[in-house]
Amino acid sequence: MKLPAISIVVCVLFILHAACSVESRRSFRSWEYTSIFAFGDSFADVGNTPGKSHGPVSRAWYYPYGESVTTGRAKATGRFSDDKVQSDFLAKTILGLHEAPPAYNRVGFHLYLNGVTFATGGAGVFQVPAANVTTIGQQVDSFERLLKKGTISRSRLRYSVFLVAVSGNDYEPAISNEMLAAKVTDEIVAIVNRLRKLGAKKILVNNMHPLGCAPRRARYGNTGNYTGCDQHGNAIASVHNNLLEQKLANTNDTVLVLDINTAFTKIINGSYGSDQFTNRLRPCCEATDPKGYCGRGDNAGVLEFNFKLDMDHVNSYFYWDEMNPTNAGWKAVMKQLERTIKDFLSTDH
Ligand SMILES: *[C@@H]1O[C@H](CO)[C@@H](O)[C@H](O)[C@H]1NC(C)=O
Ligand SMILES: *[C@@H]1O[C@H](CO)[C@@H](O)[C@H](O)[C@H]1NC(C)=O
Ligand SMILES: *[C@@H]1O[C@H](CO)[C@@H](O)[C@H](O)[C@H]1NC(C)=O
Ligand SMILES: *[C@@H]1O[C@H](CO)[C@@H](O)[C@H](O)[C@H]1NC(C)=O
């Protein structure tokens, strides 16, 4: 619930601000947006993966995922981080929502007052065989069903922010070639156009983070042992980003391509937050076995972990596991994008 008295005070402040400002663009008004609908993979997953085993996709339900969480009953919440992920920072820090959108698979009957996230760790625009989770198109199918049933009313869509977080599962395991980037970006554009047809007015679309810097590439890449990024992985991300920018250029009233690539790169190359992030490629939770992964444990109940963890210094790490940023990492990425997002959400819709 928003407090009306505070809203009025803030409103007066904004009117004064607008009157004094020479800018034609008005200020961001946080109360205009009440919901987020998120689609994608681990960057925006807040608990959609099944939690049955310690498999690569389900591990976010087990130690050490969520180790920085201090509130609530369970630490691991199905997020691929030590605490929060991208959609949480978008909701709470940037939009100022009371609650971040919950996971679609975890809520029963629900009015989705703050929206909902369909994003699922391991998902791609195409079916990713290793993960066996919903594709991002299937996530949009679920959203469309809620609209058709009236669970989410169409009149709410103009007060909603959409997030499409595609982080490269389609390019794994081999990172693949440029031809694939053409197909992946076509699919992202198709997803965005579907959301626009369904009534979305403000859609944030992540560009591709530097794939070659993700610890799983930096560990074995060009120079190895986290001493540099894998150039081939970064080249694919560049091809992807150029194509995405071109293909979405004519939809810039409803679509903002979020340049997470630059935000990640600045942290990794030390030009942003270097006082804090002294570990920029090596993950806080690192597999000790080359075939292992963070969170891998023995399913038989014997706690025998194939990873090492440096929780004492978690805030100095940009990456949490071999692909995903830490809570501190996401905070620093979203801080860099906050102004751009607020400017975009301030234009008429
Ligand atoms: C894939 O997921 C579906 C639905 O969760 C499940 O029924 C099926 O058994 C899974 N297939 C494999 C190969 O794990
Ligand atoms: C990798 O780097 C770490 C710390 O920088 C060092 O302790 C370790 O010996 C290195 N491993 C190899 C295989 O070079
Ligand atoms: C969209 O792009 C056009 C042409 O590049 C530009 O004039 C306009 O300001 C852009 N709109 C927004 C909302 O950024
Ligand atoms: C770091 O990366 C950013 C974004 O790509 C770039 O603009 C900047 O020049 C780089 N800085 C250094 C020191 O390499």
Image (cartoon, grey):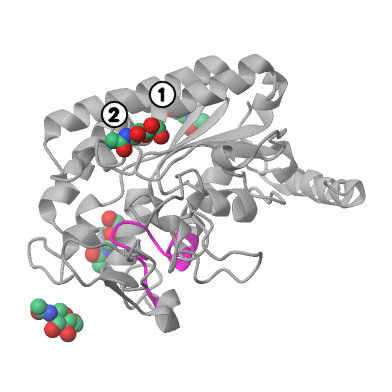
The front one of 42 and 299 is: 299
Residue lying farthest bottom? 312
Percent across and percent down for residue 334 are 49, 55
Instruction: Decide whether residue 325 is among the magenta residues.
Output: yes
Q: Is residue 338 above or below residue 294?
A: above
Q: Quadrant of residue 131?
A: top left
> Residue at 37% of width from left, 36% of height from top?
133
Q: Horizontal placement of 261 versus 151: left or right?
A: left
Please identify the dominant SS of the magenta region: loop
Indicate the position of residue 342 as horizontal and vertical percent values. Answer: 58, 45
Q: What whole-number distance in Å separates the C-alpha atoms at marks 1 and 2? A: 12 Å
Q: Secondary structure at mark 2?
A: loop
CB contact under 8 Å: marks 1 and 2: no
Q: Classify 55 as above or below 326.
A: above
Residue placed at 55% from the left, 38% from the top?
Answer: 105
- Quickly name the residue at label 1: 191
The stretch in magenta equals 316-331
Front of the two marks 1 and 2: 2
Who comes first in sequence, dot 1 or dot 2?
Answer: 2
Residue 153 image point, x, y percent? 70, 21
User: Residue at position x 61%, y 48% from top?
Assistant: 91
Find numbered disc 1 in the image and state the secondary structure of the residue it sits on.
helix
How far across and how far down the image is residue 144, in percent? Answer: 55, 19
Residue 171 part of the magenta segment: no
Q: Residues within 10 Å of mark 1 (few under 14, many from 20)?
A: many
**Quarter of the displayed picture in which ligand 4 can be seen:** bottom left
Q: Give the amino acid type for the residue marked by disc 1 in the picture.
A: Ile
Residue 331 numbered tag: none
- Say which amino acid is labelled 2: Phe
Q: Which residue is mark 2?
A: 126
Q: For residue 172, which quarter of the picture? A: top left
Q: Residue at x 52, y 63 (%)?
A: 83
